[in-house]
Image (tube, rainbow, N blue to C red):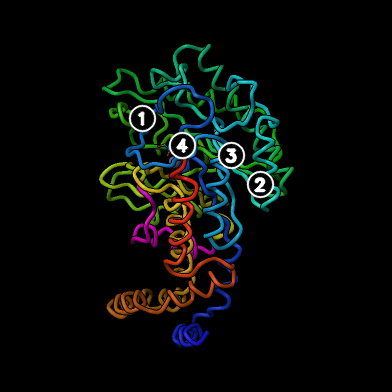
Amino acid sequence: MARLDDAKEMYENLGVDVDKALAKLQKVKISMHCWQGDDVCGFENSGDLSGGIATTGNYPGKARTPDELMDDIDQALRLIPGKHKLNLHSIYAITDEKPERDALEPRHFKKWQDFAKERGLGLDFNPTFFSHPKAADGLTLSHPDAKIRKFWIRHAKCCRAIAEHFGKKLGIPSLNNIWVPDGFKDIPADRLSPRKRLRDSLDEIFDEKRDGKYLYDSVESKLFGLGLEACTVGSHEFYMNYAAKRGVLCLLDNGHFHPTESVGDKIPSMLLFNDMMALHVSRPVRWDSDHVVLLNDDLREIANEIVRCNALDKVLIALDYFDASVNRVAAWVVGMRNMQKAILAALLTPWKEFAKLQNEGRSYELMALMEELRTYPMGDVWNAFCEMNNVPVMQNWLTDVKQYEQDVQRKRG
Ligand code: RNT
Ligand code: ZN
């Protein structure tokens, strides 16, 4: 603990209370996306991934069944400090009945509910508007054919009911996030009508009353999808306005903006006009490539803003990436631990003092201190956090992942 004591002294000299930071970090729940475990395949066997998103790579050992996916999730959770949430998609139902997506019920997710309950996890949920024959032309809730729209409206309603059920059963509110791929590969003749149809479909979905104590609703915008490059119906402007009018949460995915835009910068503006918001934390590399989340400046700025806005309980944080070219358990562990490290770094920063420098126009001092802080011994505090939570410190978790890979994942056909 000598290293922790030294680190504490250094941070305390700047006015940062390390114990308080650790206590705050302990309470942060990050929603871990089940779909990194199997490259967004799910258990429906409905064919290839579609909807303008793609996984690349074929690293061996991906989970093929519910049991394998659960084992892998357990393995990841053993290496991630804290108690978190698991984020499910509707294509991960565990049932022999083969229900259509507009007939899904909470019972089809009972195994996930039990899994979460036993481990003290929360569950979040997502309707799946892709990888389905009725989404083959890239349109769902904005489809010109009313029959297709109705199908997807019914699907979304089922999913809200499922998420509300999770919230009730687990005692942790569940976020149901709506993302639709709807868009056009080439320049459309009419951008307004599809957006009207999307608005009206969403209205119909949200008109069904659900209990806000258990269920949060969010809508996720996007800039473009693969094969849908010219226009996305659910653009940022569309959803930011929709969410504000309708009182649902706006979800920002940091892969869904122009590459030089900063989602960190957007957070205070969103929070100024909304009590809560939601995030999909990803890592776009030149495009919305969904790489594993690293501790880079983009991530740190997202965490900084959440902490500076005192909004750790107002911003619902979920991870969203899918890299099929690496061990998928490692992909989860790296992303989850990095999200936590970014929050820890933010909590170990004397923002009040820094804001004072900003307001007094002392900008070179601010710049210098921010840069010096980068090499402060955050790693010692992080290791203490891992120890407090009985998970491996530093890179030691890699030994477990390699062992698991050898004993379990490599043995899968
Ligand atoms: C797609 C969106 C969406 C999906 C998941 C699987 O670009 O980011 O959130 O990644 O629903
Ligand atoms: Zn997303």
Amino acid type indicated by mark 4: Tyr
Q: Which residue is mark 1?
A: 52
Q: Which SS does the magenta portion mostly show?
A: helix
Amino acid type indicated by mark 3: Asp
Compare marks 4 and 2 and give the one earlier in the sequence.
2
Say whether marks 4 and 2 touch (CB < 8 Å): no
Counting other residues with Cα less than 10 Å from the Cα at mark 1, is it few (<14), some (14-19), or many (20 or more)? some
- Up the image or down, 77 lies above or below 136; here it is below
- Up the image or down, 108 lies above or below 17; here it is above
Q: Residue 67 got which mark?
A: 3
- Mark nearest the camera among 3 and 2 is 3
Is 266 situated left or right of 25 in this image? left
Is 210 situated left or right of 351 in this image? right
Q: Which residues are magenta?
A: 291-310
Q: Which residue is mark 2?
A: 116
Magenta-colored stretch includes residue 72: no
